[in-house]
Image (spheres, grey):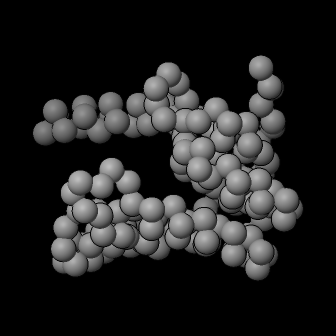
Amino acid sequence: MIPPMAPISIEPTAIRAYYYTSVVGDEQRIKLVEQSLWENGFLAKVFKKQKQQTKSKGVDIALTTDFLSNAFLNNYDVAVLIAGDADYIPMVNEVKRLGKLVYVVFFHGEKLGLNRALHLASDQFLNIRDTFTKQWREYLDELESK
């Protein structure tokens, strides 16, 4: 087992937070999702997905393009990737080669979607399982009390 690195001090808030996703629906639905994400502080990149598609490749390509180009342009020192997909390993390795730090944030545990190789490719891994579960329970408790 690899011991975790000590967390590196980073700013408490990001200069910019991107959110990449795909939705099933028309242009109005896409605009609604973009608006909702913008209201929550994200620069949204929303792609249209057909019902039968399980995954939209536009999301992965756009995220990778922005991740790499912003690293190359020296727009950040530390990137935080909230994902668990092994498809991002080459991107993470290239960004690290450019001298940037890459934090991967995701759920750690059996069958939760985190690829172990992505975990190991990161400079720092942050498990959000317990925090997410706690917040979700508090939210549900709040709903029940209303």
Q: Nearer the viewer, residue 104 or 63?
A: 63
Judged from this view, the residue extending furthest toward the front is 52
Which residue is found at the position 77% from the left and 75% from the top?
A: 72
Q: Nearer the viewer, residue 45 or 55?
A: 55
Q: Which percent across, then down, holds residue 100? A: 80, 61
Is residue 85 in sight in this rendering? yes
In which image quadrant can residue 46 be found?
bottom left
Q: Quadrant of the N terminus?
A: top right
Q: Which percent across, then down, holds residue 31? A: 27, 77
Judged from this view, the residue extending furthest toward the left is 146
Above or below residue 87? Residue 137 is above
**Number of labelled discs?**
0
Q: Quadrant of the C terminus?
A: top left
Left or right: 145 in relation to 67: left
Which residue is found at the position 51% from the left and 61% from the top?
A: 60
Is residue 41 in sight in this rendering? no
Which residue is found at the position 66% from the left and 41% from the top?
A: 118
Left or right: 59 in relation to 51: right
Above or below residue 28? Residue 78 is above
Which residue is found at the position 46% from the left and 26% from the top?
A: 111
Left or right: 81 in relation to 55: right
Q: Which percent across, then down, holds residue 87? A: 59, 50
Left or right: 139 in relation to 26: right
Above or below residue 64? Residue 31 is below
